[in-house]
Image (tube, helix red, strand yellow):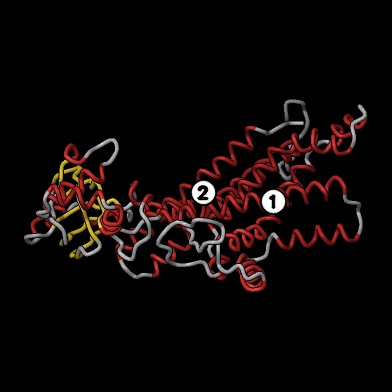
Amino acid sequence: MSASGRPIRPDLPDMLDVGGRQARRRRRGIRALEAAVAVPVVLALLLIGALLFDVVTDTVSWQVIEPAGSGRSFSFAEGFAVLGAWERVMRLELAARGVSDADADALLADPDERRVLRARNRVELMPWVDGRPFRWLVTTARDDLVADVPLIGGAGGSRELLAGAEAGQVVVLNAWLDAGFLSRNASRSPMTAGLLPALLGSLLLVALVIVIAVPLGVGAAVYLEEYAADTKISRLIELNLSNLAGVPSVVYGILGLTVFVRLMRLGPVVLAGALTLALLVIPVVVVAAREAIRSVPPSLRQAAYGLGAARSQVVFRVVLPSAIGGITTGVVLAIARTIGETAPLLVLGAAAFVPRPPDGVLSTFTAVPIQIYTWVSENDVEFTHAASAAIVVLLAVLGLLYGLAFYLRRRFARRW
């Protein structure tokens, strides 16, 4: 008997606890689903972390070099200068090679000779040279590589590398990613190769894409959302924009090759690449801008119309300022996609090797992704280190852009 005097029926379930059992069952199901989702996410993050670790550590390597120059290294104090460190170290190197001060002055004063010296000699502050930290070393395109050991695999064996080095050989810890790597021109030699032409080519491409794609994309979004009537033509345009946003990028490369390079006879120049990439990102900009404009409450429009504002005033003084956060975020993400694109530029015919930065929109060019592809395809361990350094630069630029998009999203976010 229960406390209330009612008989207890053990064969019947406790009806008051049915809801609790169902809630516990749902919680167990939710936890199982979260675990099933978390496992692949964690594995993906671990793989990405391992990949990033491998790329970053590949930008530094232990090397045994047989230099074509003097092979001497100089202390940080000997070669340091606030301005002109390259010239100061180069004078020390020329003196070590037996060049007199007068001849060195003549070489450095002649613009052509100075340019040749810069192209053939790499002046770097190495983290470690022959057992001594932070030494200036001049390496050239004619140096012979005796051994190249990864950073992790050679850190414990640096003494063995020193012990095994023969007379005239130098053991260095070579940091490929440094200020010189970003400021040097391209070269056939990995020791003197730099990223400057590809980096400036990518920046010029991005600048032109912004000038072309942003006004067209935002303007099309404003027209479709605020002015276009609901007709078959407008619905067809919307459908095509949604489909174009998912078209593979290589198709845009074929389109750019056919229209801009061959029909318009521009050739594989910066302008043709920018027009092709603009076609690639315009649908993305339109979709993002339309979503941002659509998120503006209709009450703001009605209030502006109630105060006597014209449609153009409502659009440009009420709607667009309220949607600027979403529009800016979409534009930044589209530009980030532009920087990482390789297939359209390869189909377009962008050069794999450009010795100097582009000097205008009608000059030949290369970009950072193409430079990475070129270095990796060289099948040379030193070019692999250079490619890893370029990948780190590209990831840093993409990280800055995505961080900017996140900041702008938070900065201009509005709650209606």
Q: Which numbered disc flags the more N-terminal residue, 2 or 1? A: 1
The label number, if any, that marks residue 398 in the structure image: 2
Name the residue carrying label 1: 285
Residue 358 image position (x, y, % from top left): 48, 57
Residue 210 image position (x, y, % from top left): 63, 49
Residue 389 versus residue 351 in the image, above or below: above
Q: Amino acid at mark 2?
A: Leu
Judge the density around disc 2: few (<14), some (14-19), many (≥20) Cα neighbours within 10 Å.
Answer: some
The label number, if any, that marks residue 3 in the structure image: none
Give the position of the N terminus as an image quadrant. Answer: top right
Seen from the viewer's position, the closer of residues 258 and 235 is 258
Residue 410 image position (x, y, % from top left): 63, 34
Q: Secondary structure at mark 2?
A: helix
**Which residue is painted at 58% across and 66% down in the image?**
344
How far is the residue under mark 2 from the one under mark 1?
18 Å
Q: Quadrant of residue 17?
A: top right
Residue 249 image position (x, y, % from top left): 61, 65
**Which residue is painted at 37% across and 52% down in the image?**
53
Number of labels in the image equals 2
Judge the density around disc 1: few (<14), some (14-19), many (≥20) Cα neighbours within 10 Å.
Answer: many
Q: Amino acid at mark 1?
A: Val
Seen from the viewer's position, the closer of residues 7 and 327 is 327
Q: Is residue 301 visible?
A: yes
Give the position of the C terminus as an image quadrant. Answer: top right
Q: Secondary structure at mark 1?
A: helix
Tell me if 193 is positioned left or right of 127 in this view. right
